[in-house]
């Protein structure tokens, strides 16, 4: 037998044995411990992701890899954007979940309540109706009318010299002692509303203002 005829069969045998031994090869797909195309993770391979990096509230939670090679965040708590309102973590809403609220429950007259990307209420499309006698968010008062000079302005702001309750409707009263003459006040401190004893029908004398913001005419002459 020649050397050539001996080596050729031997080579064929070795190649066959190597081809049959795949014990050192890694199977492709989920579960091989390698990150294949389309996998978020595989076994302990998490691409350095953590509960914190994925935006979950439980920063000390343990991120795991599921049997289908997607992140298992069941131990990470909640996060903004998961469509669940995590009130304990400070969320007011989450996506379309408004936790049973509306513009009206927040004190507005109407409009469309929304949820911002940080899971807080977005009231930019809520509306108030000043003058309806109902205290709504954004209003300092609402006395049921749009008239100025009665303590609550047509924009539902408290006018200078007045104090208003937060009731519906608001009740407004002049502040006696602030030197502003408003409402039913005759005067306020040294502010006599530019009036004198003569303006009040007296011949002369010195007009004053009493503590209850009414004229004190005891110094006026008959």
Image: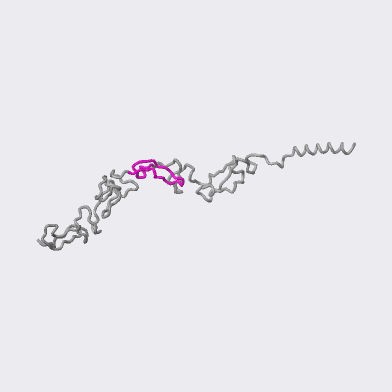
Task: Report the magenta stretch's main SS.
Answer: loop
Query: Which residues fall within the magenta stretch?
Result: 102-128
Residue 103 position by quadrant: top left
What residue do we see at 85% from left, 38% from top?
A: 7
Residue 20 position by quadrant: top right
Relative height, residue 204 to residue 69 (above, below) = below
What residue do we see at 33% from left, 44% from top?
A: 128
Magenta stretch: residue 127 in it?
yes
Q: Position of residue 86 (x, y in %)?
A: 46, 45
Q: Position of residue 40 (x, y in %)?
A: 59, 43
Q: Quadrant of the N terminus?
A: top right
Q: Position of residue 38 (x, y in %)?
A: 60, 40
What residue do we see at 31% from left, 43% from top?
A: 129
Query: Is residue 119 left or right of 216 when viewed as pictured?
Result: right
Colour setup of the view: one colour
Magenta stretch: residue 75 in it?
no
Q: Quadrant of the C terminus?
A: bottom left
């Amino acid at each position: 037998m020649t050397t050539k005829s001996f080596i050729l069969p031997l080579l064929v045998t070795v190649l066959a044995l190597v081809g049959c031994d795949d014990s050192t090869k890694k199977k492709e797909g989920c579960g091989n411990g390698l990150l294949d195309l389309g996998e978020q993770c595989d076994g302990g391979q998490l691409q350095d992701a953590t509960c914190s990096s994925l935006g979950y509230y439980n920063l000390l939670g343990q991120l795991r890899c599921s049997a289908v090679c997607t992140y298992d965040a069941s131990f990470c708590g909640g996060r903004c954007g998961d469509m669940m309102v995590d009130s304990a973590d400070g969320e007011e809403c989450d996506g379309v979940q408004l936790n049973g609220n509306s513009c009206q429950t927040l004190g507005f007259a109407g409009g469309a309540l929304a949820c911002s990307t940080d899971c807080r209420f977005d009231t930019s499309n809520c509306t108030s109706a000043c003058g309806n006698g109902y205290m709504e968010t954004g209003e300092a008062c609402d006395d049921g009318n749009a008239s100025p000079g009665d303590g609550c302005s047509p924009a539902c702001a408290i006018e200078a010299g007045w104090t208003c309750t937060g009731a519906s409707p608001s009740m407004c009263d002049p502040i006696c002692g602030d030197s502003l003459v408003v409402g039913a006040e005759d005067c306020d401190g040294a502010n006599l509303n530019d009036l004198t004893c003569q303006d009040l029908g007296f011949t002369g004398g010195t007009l004053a203002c009493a503590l209850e913001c009414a004229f004190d005419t005891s110094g006026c002459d008959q």
